[in-house]
Image: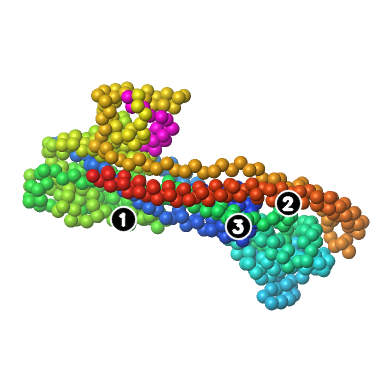
Amino acid sequence: MEAFYIYLIKSSGLIALFYLAYHFMLRKETFFTSNRWFLLLGLFTSVLLPLVVFTKIIWVEPTPVNYDWSSLPITTTVNEDHTEEYIYLGLAMLYCMGALYLLTKFGFDFYSLQKVFKGKIIKRQADFKFIDLQDNLAPFSFFNTIVYNSSLYTTAELENILEHEKVHCEQNHTADVLIERVFCAIFWFNPFMWLYKKAILQNLEFIADSEATKKTSDKKAYQFTLLKITTHENCVAITNHFYQSLIKKRIVMLNKNQSKKSNSWKYVLIIPALVAFVILFQVNVIAQEKIAVQATTKIIKANEKSVDVYKIDKNTTDEELKEKSSNLKENYAIIATFSGIKRNSKNELTAIKVDLKKGKEIAQKMETKGTEAINEFGIIVSKDDNGMLTVNFGSDETIINQKSIVIAPNAPSVTEKEIFINGKKVSQDDLDKIDPNEIATMNVNKNDDKQEIRIITNNHRKMINENDIYINNEKVSQNELDRLDQSTIERMDVNKDGKTIRIITKNGIQYSQERNLPVPPTPPTPPVFKIKTPAPPAFPKAPKAPKGDPIKGDKKAWKEFEKKMEDYEAKMKKLEPQMEAFDKQMEEFDKKMEPFNKEMEAFEKKMKVYEQQMEEYHSNLERERKK
């Protein structure tokens, strides 16, 4: 259940990302068809990309543990808290109620549409079907069917309306409308989804207006037709309406100059954001212990008598886990605690944490989690005649014959291990509590009898990057700071106001074993957009037509409406000089954009070089760390 909520949150975030990219970069461009595919691609990317998960394994050294087998095992009693389950259940019920309501409304809209079509005379022309109604209903199209009331319009107006609706039919815009309705039902809780829906419908109208005006002789008459249709408020929800409450924007777009092809670079800017999303949220970091082999392993291999493997796979039930825990305790006095258990809708294990304990000390710990079902693994236990015990996790029983962790009475540690997080010495428990996703770097240094694990977290790395670093009054890089042997630090002063970190060492600068780590390249700086977009003139508000038929209805009201329309047309005519001035301002704006576009092209070239440098940096970094 939790995995499903995380999926919805990730998908909702991507929907918001695509909408913001469209709103701030593409909304005012005249690439209407390209914008249509961008918006649709955004929806499908938002539901598919969160399903793609990459796994990254971070290897850490194991913790040798000595056991006193004379001590009695301690029984662990766990009181389960179901509060979290109740919260998830409540949220699930709320989500299902919202989705069910919208899907039911979707079904009623189809029913209303069938009532409009039922019993009506259908005229066919080429690939189109025409239905001429007598109702006061706004013109609309549904796939290849166009519905209108011819008595409400002149011949010229009806021609403009039909050309507009034919574009909707030819380009199959109804499919876009149905897709956004389904997505609204699934992501009804996301406010950006409703803004996304509005953007899709607006862009479809821009496409139809643009194509229809290419086939009409009088562009101005087409605009007046738009204004006349604003009076029709009755419409069917799942159709393409001739009027979408955006007349002002449509008229502006009709009179706007075509965007230059060079502005199409804006579509590419979404790619770095998607890459960042994958790196930040779709890379599952798993910390896994390396297998340490003690000196007594050879003896065990010669004397091993019994080997038990307790297998756990995606279909293992809670009862089976309890049984395995009971068997481990009874047979080997090892307490196995299973926690962090999560399952998907198929009741398959997607996450589990295993702790193996003897007394108060941890023998072994393993954790796996993700959105997919877990791979099969086993708890492998073997014991020889001398009472020496071998415990390990693995996916194959042959691990016992190759590498294992030996647990025996008073067995000496392989090495003395020290753990440092952000320069501070911590315990094994502190290391276990750290979130692997917060780890920026991890270095393991080994000597003959000493082992160091040094971890830098993302927050600490960010804090360090924002400050100038000085070691013994000499300014150094982040790379040199990472390699500093922190046991030699005598004093460290942090000046938040001056944004400086000053470190004084005991006997000069001493670096840890990783001395030749490469320096990461510096990313290029993107150009700054400082050009102000000109504002279009303010259009007067169109008068609202009276209800009813203009012939059989209230004639006095319709005469007053005609007078208001004449005044409105006069005001629109007065706006023509302002529109011409606005067109000139847009031409100047396009000219000012040319240097910025060139800067963006140069920036993109530098970014390609930077990406190549980063690939080389990571390769060199991996090579140096393997030495």
Which residue is identified by label 3? 261
Q: Identify the magenta region.
A: 457-472
Which residue is at the front of the view, 583 or 191?
583
Q: Position of residue 259 (x, y in %)?
A: 64, 55
Most foreground residue, 329 or 301: 301
Please give the residue where the numbered disc 2 appears in the rendered image. Answer: 583
User: Which residue is pictured at 39% across the width and 43% down the height?
Assistant: 521
- Say if mark 3 contacts mark 1, CB within 8 Å: no
CA distance separating discs 1 and 2: 63 Å
Q: Residue 266 location, x and y as percent? A: 56, 52
- Which element type, helix, strand or loop, lies under badge 1? loop
Which tag, 2 or 3, sits closer to the chain's start? 3
Residue 43 horizontal/vertical position (percent): 54, 56
Q: CA distance from mark 2 to mark 3?
A: 18 Å
Label 3: element kind: helix
Q: Residue 123: which quarter of the image?
A: bottom right
Sequence-wise, which precedes: disc 3 or disc 1? 3
Amino acid type, residue under disc 2 in the picture:
Asp
Q: Would you say residue 465 sits in the magenta stretch? A: yes
Identify which residue is drawn at 63% across, 59% down: 32
Q: In this image, 498 relative to 485: left or right?
A: right
Residue 532 among magenta residues: no
What label sits on residue 375 in the rendered view? 1
